[in-house]
Image (spheres, rainbow, N blue to C red):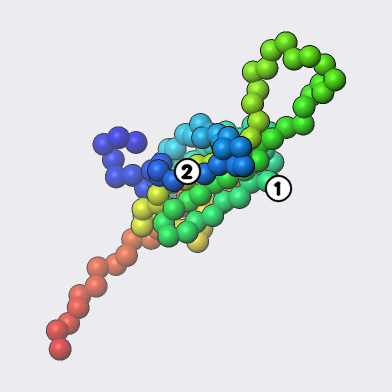
Amino acid sequence: MTGKDEKVKPSAISAGDESGHTFSSLVDIYEEPDGTTVLVMEMPGASRENVDINVDKGVLAISGDGSREPVLEKCDCIYSGFDTGEYFRAFALSDEVDRDSIEAQMQNGVLVLRLPKASKAATKKIEIK
């Protein structure tokens, strides 16, 4: 999103669980022809029941639990490429995003947020009294 006014940009806010182990998920952000911004975020192991999405003071915060049950508790691990823990990402929203119309869908560990463009404020002439 370089060279354009950004409606959604990563924020410096961070969070962690008790162990301090938090994942910053991969995210794609793109704009559709109608001006809707779409945010696609990977959250393997997370389900819609354990994902929280909040907007407060212009910050969109997404968190979720990606913890998984150990597959083979009684076996010795030879190699483990998967890690478990909490997901967290935060994004600063510009005034161009209609915060009341944000939609979210979750399927197969992928969260898709649709952030519609706010209707343009009409120019208003102020009379001097």
Q: Residue 64, located in which quarter of the rendered image?
A: top right
Residue 41, percent from left and from top: 54, 36
Q: 38 or 17, which lies in front?
A: 17
User: Which of the two discs, 1 and 2, labels the residue nearer the N terminus?
Assistant: 2
What percent of the width, then of the height, locates residue 48?
68, 45
Q: Nearer the viewer, mark 1 or mark 2?
A: 2
Q: Secondary structure at mark 2?
A: loop
Query: Residue, x 15% and y 89% (percent of image)?
Result: 129
The residue that label 1 is drawn on is: 49
The reply to whether residue 117 is visible in this rendering is: no
Left or right of 57, for residue 19: right
Q: Which residue is mark 2?
A: 14
Q: Residue shown at 47%/43% (left/top)?
A: 14
Q: Quadrant of the N terminus?
A: top left
Circle 1 packing at 10 Å, graded few (<14), some (14-19), many (20+), is few
Residue farthest to the bottom, as pictured = 129
How far across and how far down the image is residue 70, in percent? Answer: 77, 27
Query: Quick check: 124 above or below 63?
Result: below
Crowd around label 2: few <14 · some 14–19 · many ≥20 (10 Å): few
Q: Viewed as shown, does residue 34 lie left or right of 17?
A: left
Q: Callout 1, which amino acid?
A: Glu
**Viewer-proximal residue, 11 or 37?**
11
